[in-house]
Image (cartoon, rainbow, N blue to C red):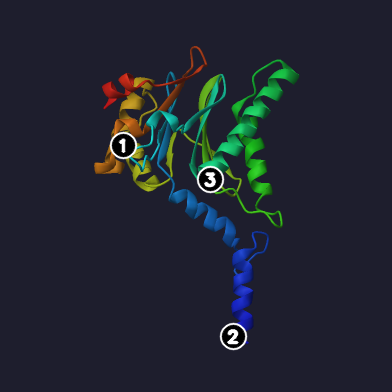
Amino acid sequence: MQQINQNQAMGYDRASITFSPDGRLLQVEYAKKTVKQGASALGMVCKDGVVLIADKRITEKLIVPASIEKTFQVDDHIGATATGLVMDGRVLIEKAQVIAQQHKIVFDSPIDLLSLVKEISNIKQAFTQYGGARPFGVSLLFAGVNGRPQLFVTDPTGIFFEYKATGIGEGENEIKQMLSKDYKESININEAIKLGVGILKNVLGKEFDIDRLDVAYITSKDKKFKKCSKEELQKAK
C-alpha cells in the first residue's frame, strides 16, 4: 500500500496536466522555482519612457560579454527580457517578434503591448495543460510605449500583470523592496537607469560588474527601442 501511495505521488510530480490531491500543479510550481534561480532583471516605467535592466550573469572569464544578449527588441516600440530558462525565453520572444510583424503587415499599424502580452501568456498557459509537454520555465518582462509607457510581467503559469516597476529572478524580493522605497512615478529614464544599476549593484554585491548589465530603454517621444552603451552605463554607476 505504501508503494502504491509513493507511485501516485510521483505521478502528480511528473505530469504537468495532473492535479495533486491538494489542488496543485507541481510541474508549474517547479517552473516558477526555476525562474527564482534565474539572473536578476528589473523594469521601470518613467515619465518619459520605460527602462529594462538585466544581469547577463557571466560565469566564465573567457566568455565575450558582448555575445550575451538579455534585452531583446520585439518591435520598434517594444522590448523584453527573460529570466529562468533563457532558451525558453528566446523561443517566446521570437514568437512575439513574429506576432508583432504579422500585426503590422495585416493591419498596417504597430501592435499594442497588451495584445502581444496576452498572446504570449496564452501560449504559456496552454503548455500547463498539454500532455507530454512541460511548462515554460521562464518569466518575461515586456516594456513598450503605446500612447503611454507600459511594463508587464508574464510568469510560467500564463498569468500577467502590469507594473509601474518590478523585478524578476534571483533577488526578486530584494529588488522589489528597494524599488518600493526609491521608485517614484516622476522618475526620468536617466534617473531610472542610475537607480536600476545601483539596485543590481546592491543585489550582486562582489559579483557586480558593469559588463554584466544589459540595459535598454524606449522613450515616449520617438517610441524606439535603444540599448545603452558601455559609456552610458559607466556614467550611471
Residue 85 appears in view: yes
Residue ID at (71%, 24%): 102
User: Which badge, 1 or 2, comes first in the chain's sequence?
Assistant: 2
Residue type at mark 1?
Answer: Ile
Image label count: 3
Q: Which residue is mark 1?
A: 199
* Residue 186 to residue 43: above or below: above
Quarter location, residue 14: bottom right
Report the mark closest to the observer, 1 or 2. Answer: 2
In the image, taking residue 153 as reference, residue 41 lies left or right, namely: left
Query: What's the distance in space between the residues labelled 2 and 3, CA to CA?
Result: 35 Å
Report the mark closest to the observer, 1 or 3. Answer: 3
Residue ID at (32%, 19%): 232
Q: Which residue is mark 3?
A: 138
Residue 44 appears in view: no
Query: What's the distance in space between the residues labelled 1 and 3, CA to CA?
Result: 22 Å
Looking at the picture, tell me which residue is in the foreground, 180 or 28: 28
> Badge 2: how crowded within 10 Å, few (<14), some, or many (20+)?
few
Residue ID at (37%, 20%): 229
